[in-house]
Amino acid sequence: MTRIVILTGSELRHTFFRKFMALSPDIEVAQSYCEGLEKSLRAWTERETVHDLRARHLAARERSERDFFGLFVQTTPDCSNPLFLPKGDINLPQYTDGIMDQDPDLVVLYGCSIIREPLLSHFRGRMLNVHLGLSPYYRGSGTNYWPLVNREPEYVGATFMYPDAGIDTGKILHQMRASIVWGDTPVQIGNRLIVDMARTYREIVLHFKEVKEMPRLPKPFLERYYRKSDFSEESVAKLYQNFKEGLVEAYLREASARCSKVPMIENPGIPANPCE
């Protein structure tokens, strides 16, 4: 039995993740710390004077999450012991002391704030994070959104790493690409990836003692770093224009060649999601 603490958010995809992890008979979730929505992308966007396209895109994402995860979340018993707290408070002593006092085998991160000291040092080698995006190619915010805006679906994926004090700069354990199929929309690609990510994350937790140290990827010629403030009306318009013009179909015709130019770290023994 592996005993874990989960640090996550409270959107539907995060609820799906923590409840899914807690279903495994070989994983005990001692506590899930779930940060609130006060600083979410939707909350940030709604403060903008003009945000019609962004609001429609985020509404479509939320609708798709309900379609993908809603029934599971509504009907699955919650064995993840959630504790809800404001966004950004996870590094306050009242929470960090509680996490350290529980002394879990692993601390599992998905969608929480950047973790700082003393948690980083206390759980060095026992804290895992998933970055939805392929590091080091895309870092920062929206790292599976911008590859689709830039017509680069081969960069859509997930990166499992040891977190450090930087942003998406920790040592990488394993990576996987999104499974993309004909007719996909942006939100369908993202939600399918979250399902595949959760399955892979569970395997990493269950077989953590077998996870090997992996060499770092060569520094890419171009690293793309985006901030929340880069999310614009123009980028949303471009995203949907790309799909209207056949982005998915063009990618599927060239997937093998395109993926071969974007190397990933694939840890032996951890199931990888094939690039299709």
Image (cartoon, rainbow, N blue to C red):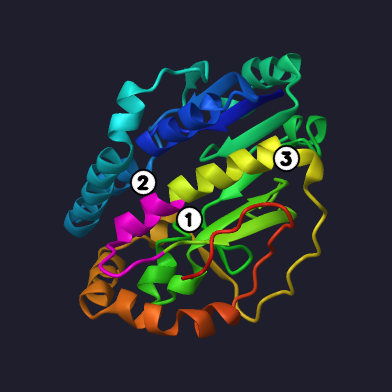
The disc at residue 41 is 2
Please give the residue where the numbered disc 3 appears in the rendered image.
Answer: 207
SS at mark 1? loop
| Category of crowding for the residue at label 3, using alpha-carbon neighbours closer than 10 angstroms: few (below 14), some (14–19), many (at least 20) | few
Q: Relative to 181, does residue 272 appear above or below in the rendering?
A: above
Looking at the image, tell me whether mark 2 or mark 1 is earlier in sequence order: 2
Looking at the image, tell me whether mark 1 or mark 3 is earlier in sequence order: 1
Check whether the beta carbons of the residues at disc 2 and disc 1 lie within 8 A of each other.
yes
Which residue corresponds to the image point at 47% horizontal and 61% vertical from the top-left?
178
Residue 186 in which image quadrant = bottom left
Q: Which residues are magenta?
A: 180-193
Q: Please provide percent x and percent y for residue 38.
A: 38, 32
Q: Is residue 11 left or right of residue 201?
A: left
Q: Quadrant of the N terminus?
A: top right
Q: Please provide percent x and percent y for residue 21.
A: 54, 31
C-alpha distance separating marks 2 and 3? 34 Å
Check whether the beta carbons of the residues at disc 2 and disc 3 lie within 8 A of each other.
no
Q: Relative to 251, does residue 276 appear above or below in the rendering?
A: above
Which residue corresponds to the image point at 36% horizontal and 34% vertical from the top-left?
12
Looking at the image, tell me whether mark 2 or mark 3 is earlier in sequence order: 2
